[in-house]
Amino acid sequence: MSTPDPNIRISNAEREAIIGRLQSATEEGRLELDEFAERSQKVYEAKTYAEVERLLTDLPEETGALSVPGVPRPSARVPDLELAPSFSSVKREGGWTVPSRIVAKPKYGSVKLDCRHAEFSSRDVVLEVGLAFSSVEVVLPRGASAVDDGVQLHGGSMHNGCHDSGGPSIRVSGNNWFGSVKIRYERRFLWWRW
Protein backbone atom coordinates (compact mmCIF):
# COMPACT_ATOMS: atom_id res chain seq x y z
CA MET A 1 0.00 0.00 0.00
CA SER A 2 1.30 3.46 -0.84
CA THR A 3 1.76 5.72 2.13
CA PRO A 4 1.75 9.50 2.00
CA ASP A 5 4.84 11.61 2.53
CA PRO A 6 5.23 11.82 6.34
CA ASN A 7 5.89 15.56 6.11
CA ILE A 8 2.55 16.35 4.41
CA ARG A 9 -0.03 17.99 6.65
CA ILE A 10 -3.09 15.93 7.52
CA SER A 11 -6.63 17.14 6.79
CA ASN A 12 -9.68 17.17 9.06
CA ALA A 13 -11.36 14.44 6.99
CA GLU A 14 -8.28 12.23 7.37
CA ARG A 15 -8.26 12.87 11.14
CA GLU A 16 -11.88 11.72 11.35
CA ALA A 17 -11.09 8.58 9.32
CA ILE A 18 -8.22 7.72 11.68
CA ILE A 19 -10.42 8.32 14.74
CA GLY A 20 -12.89 5.89 13.15
CA ARG A 21 -10.10 3.29 12.83
CA LEU A 22 -9.13 3.78 16.46
CA GLN A 23 -12.77 3.42 17.49
CA SER A 24 -13.03 0.14 15.52
CA ALA A 25 -9.90 -1.12 17.25
CA THR A 26 -11.44 -0.24 20.62
CA GLU A 27 -14.67 -2.07 19.76
CA GLU A 28 -12.60 -5.14 18.81
CA GLY A 29 -10.84 -5.02 22.18
CA ARG A 30 -7.44 -4.07 20.78
CA LEU A 31 -7.38 -0.75 22.66
CA GLU A 32 -8.58 0.16 26.16
CA LEU A 33 -10.86 3.17 26.53
CA ASP A 34 -8.12 5.30 28.10
CA GLU A 35 -5.75 4.38 25.22
CA PHE A 36 -8.45 5.35 22.73
CA ALA A 37 -8.95 8.71 24.47
CA GLU A 38 -5.21 9.42 24.60
CA ARG A 39 -4.61 8.49 20.95
CA SER A 40 -7.68 10.40 19.78
CA GLN A 41 -6.41 13.53 21.48
CA LYS A 42 -3.03 13.09 19.78
CA VAL A 43 -4.74 12.63 16.38
CA TYR A 44 -6.57 15.94 16.83
CA GLU A 45 -3.29 17.62 17.81
CA ALA A 46 -1.29 16.05 14.93
CA LYS A 47 -0.18 18.22 12.04
CA THR A 48 1.55 15.67 9.74
CA TYR A 49 1.15 12.04 8.68
CA ALA A 50 4.29 11.09 10.62
CA GLU A 51 2.69 12.11 13.92
CA VAL A 52 -0.42 10.02 13.20
CA GLU A 53 1.36 6.99 11.78
CA ARG A 54 3.07 6.37 15.12
CA LEU A 55 -0.33 6.05 16.77
CA LEU A 56 -1.33 3.18 14.46
CA THR A 57 1.85 1.07 14.23
CA ASP A 58 0.79 -1.54 16.80
CA LEU A 59 -2.62 -2.15 15.18
CA PRO A 60 -3.23 -4.75 12.44
CA GLU A 61 -3.56 -3.67 8.81
CA GLU A 62 -7.34 -3.86 8.53
CA THR A 63 -7.92 -1.73 11.63
CA GLY A 64 -4.89 0.47 11.99
CA ALA A 65 -3.47 1.17 8.56
CA LEU A 66 -3.12 4.78 7.65
CA SER A 67 -5.25 5.13 4.57
CA VAL A 68 -4.39 7.44 1.72
CA PRO A 69 -7.53 9.35 0.70
CA GLY A 70 -8.77 8.24 -2.67
CA VAL A 71 -6.40 5.23 -2.85
CA PRO A 72 -8.01 1.91 -1.84
CA ARG A 73 -5.96 -1.08 -0.74
CA PRO A 74 -4.14 -2.83 -3.57
CA SER A 75 -5.91 -6.11 -2.78
CA ALA A 76 -9.02 -4.77 -4.50
CA ARG A 77 -8.11 -5.38 -8.18
CA VAL A 78 -10.09 -3.04 -10.36
CA PRO A 79 -10.39 -4.11 -14.03
CA ASP A 80 -9.22 -1.78 -16.79
CA LEU A 81 -11.81 0.65 -18.13
CA GLU A 82 -12.34 0.81 -21.90
CA LEU A 83 -14.55 3.54 -23.33
CA ALA A 84 -15.18 3.76 -27.07
CA PRO A 85 -18.34 5.73 -27.83
CA SER A 86 -19.23 6.42 -31.48
CA PHE A 87 -21.28 9.52 -32.29
CA SER A 88 -22.19 9.76 -28.58
CA SER A 89 -20.79 10.70 -25.21
CA VAL A 90 -19.80 8.80 -22.06
CA LYS A 91 -19.43 10.31 -18.61
CA ARG A 92 -18.12 8.85 -15.33
CA GLU A 93 -18.79 10.92 -12.21
CA GLY A 94 -19.54 10.66 -8.51
CA GLY A 95 -18.14 7.87 -6.35
CA TRP A 96 -16.73 5.58 -9.04
CA THR A 97 -13.42 3.70 -8.81
CA VAL A 98 -10.61 4.80 -11.12
CA PRO A 99 -8.65 1.75 -12.33
CA SER A 100 -4.90 1.78 -12.95
CA ARG A 101 -5.48 1.76 -16.74
CA ILE A 102 -8.10 3.57 -18.82
CA VAL A 103 -8.46 3.34 -22.60
CA ALA A 104 -10.54 6.14 -24.16
CA LYS A 105 -11.10 5.82 -27.92
CA PRO A 106 -14.14 7.88 -28.89
CA LYS A 107 -14.99 8.42 -32.55
CA TYR A 108 -16.97 11.58 -33.26
CA GLY A 109 -17.93 11.56 -29.57
CA SER A 110 -16.74 12.56 -26.12
CA VAL A 111 -15.54 11.02 -22.88
CA LYS A 112 -15.64 12.92 -19.58
CA LEU A 113 -13.99 11.44 -16.49
CA ASP A 114 -14.93 13.43 -13.38
CA CYS A 115 -12.55 12.13 -10.69
CA ARG A 116 -13.28 14.75 -8.00
CA HIS A 117 -15.17 12.27 -5.80
CA ALA A 118 -13.72 9.04 -7.20
CA GLU A 119 -11.58 6.44 -5.43
CA PHE A 120 -8.25 5.75 -7.12
CA SER A 121 -7.19 2.07 -7.19
CA SER A 122 -3.59 3.12 -7.78
CA ARG A 123 -1.46 6.20 -7.30
CA ASP A 124 -0.32 5.87 -10.93
CA VAL A 125 -3.02 5.74 -13.60
CA VAL A 126 -2.35 5.22 -17.31
CA LEU A 127 -4.78 6.94 -19.68
CA GLU A 128 -4.40 5.78 -23.27
CA VAL A 129 -6.28 7.93 -25.78
CA GLY A 130 -7.16 7.23 -29.38
CA LEU A 131 -9.20 10.19 -30.60
CA ALA A 132 -10.79 10.71 -33.99
CA PHE A 133 -12.61 14.07 -34.21
CA SER A 134 -13.53 13.63 -30.53
CA SER A 135 -12.72 14.91 -27.04
CA VAL A 136 -11.59 13.57 -23.70
CA GLU A 137 -11.93 15.70 -20.57
CA VAL A 138 -10.60 14.67 -17.16
CA VAL A 139 -11.44 16.61 -13.98
CA LEU A 140 -9.01 15.77 -11.17
CA PRO A 141 -9.20 16.47 -7.43
CA ARG A 142 -6.74 19.00 -6.00
CA GLY A 143 -3.43 17.35 -5.24
CA ALA A 144 -3.60 15.02 -8.23
CA SER A 145 -1.43 15.58 -11.28
CA ALA A 146 -1.21 14.65 -14.94
CA VAL A 147 1.75 14.07 -17.26
CA ASP A 148 1.74 14.12 -21.05
CA ASP A 149 3.56 10.86 -21.69
CA GLY A 150 3.75 11.20 -25.45
CA VAL A 151 0.36 12.04 -26.96
CA GLN A 152 0.88 12.12 -30.74
CA LEU A 153 -0.98 15.13 -32.12
CA HIS A 154 -2.33 14.96 -35.67
CA GLY A 155 -4.17 18.27 -35.86
CA GLY A 156 -5.57 17.97 -32.33
CA SER A 157 -4.84 19.69 -29.00
CA MET A 158 -3.59 18.64 -25.58
CA HIS A 159 -4.11 20.88 -22.54
CA ASN A 160 -2.87 19.80 -19.12
CA GLY A 161 -3.67 22.16 -16.25
CA CYS A 162 -2.95 19.74 -13.39
CA HIS A 163 0.54 20.01 -11.93
CA ASP A 164 0.01 19.59 -8.17
CA SER A 165 1.81 16.81 -6.34
CA GLY A 166 1.16 14.47 -3.45
CA GLY A 167 -1.87 12.70 -4.87
CA PRO A 168 -2.57 10.29 -7.70
CA SER A 169 -0.85 10.89 -11.04
CA ILE A 170 -2.29 10.26 -14.50
CA ARG A 171 0.06 9.53 -17.41
CA VAL A 172 -1.55 10.30 -20.77
CA SER A 173 -0.37 8.68 -24.02
CA GLY A 174 -1.77 7.71 -27.40
CA ASN A 175 -2.96 9.39 -30.61
CA ASN A 176 -5.11 12.45 -31.15
CA TRP A 177 -6.53 12.94 -34.66
CA PHE A 178 -8.21 16.37 -34.79
CA GLY A 179 -9.50 15.94 -31.25
CA SER A 180 -9.09 17.59 -27.87
CA VAL A 181 -7.61 16.26 -24.63
CA LYS A 182 -8.21 18.51 -21.62
CA ILE A 183 -7.13 17.74 -18.05
CA ARG A 184 -8.16 20.24 -15.40
CA TYR A 185 -9.17 20.83 -11.79
CA GLU A 186 -12.66 21.77 -10.63
CA ARG A 187 -13.76 25.25 -11.69
CA ARG A 188 -15.45 27.48 -9.14
CA PHE A 189 -17.64 30.49 -9.61
CA LEU A 190 -19.24 31.71 -6.38
CA TRP A 191 -21.28 28.68 -5.20
CA TRP A 192 -21.31 27.01 -8.60
CA ARG A 193 -18.73 24.28 -9.24
CA TRP A 194 -18.19 22.26 -12.38
Image: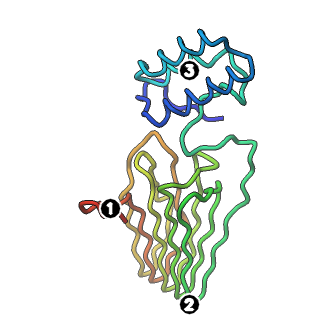
The residue carrying pointer 2 sits among few (fewer than 14), some (14 to 19) or many (20 or more) residues within 10 Å by Cα, namely: few
82 horizontally vs 166: left or right: right
Image position of 54 with respect to 1: above or below: above
Residue 7, quarter of picture: top left
What numbered label is drawn on residue 165? Answer: none
Q: Residue at x 64, y 49 (%)?
A: 121
Under mark 2, the amino acid is Phe
Q: Position of residue 87 (x, y in %)?
A: 56, 90
Q: Residue at x 45, y 74 (%)?
A: 153
Q: Residue at label 2?
A: 87
User: Which residue of the protein is positioned furthest toward the bottom in this rendering?
Assistant: 87
Q: CA distance from mark 2 to mark 1?
A: 27 Å
Q: Residue at x 72, y 30 (%)?
A: 62
Q: Position of residue 142 (x, y in %)?
A: 40, 49
The residue carrying pointer 1 sits among few (fewer than 14), some (14 to 19) or many (20 or more) residues within 10 Å by Cα, namely: few
Under mark 3, the amino acid is Glu
Q: Earlier in the sequence, mark 1 or mark 3?
A: 3
Q: Residue at label 1?
A: 187
What numbered label is drawn on residue 53? Answer: 3
Image position of 98 with respect to 26: above or below: below
Disc 2, SS: loop
CB atoms of marks 2 and 1 within 8 Å: no
Q: Position of residue 42 (x, y in %)?
A: 47, 15
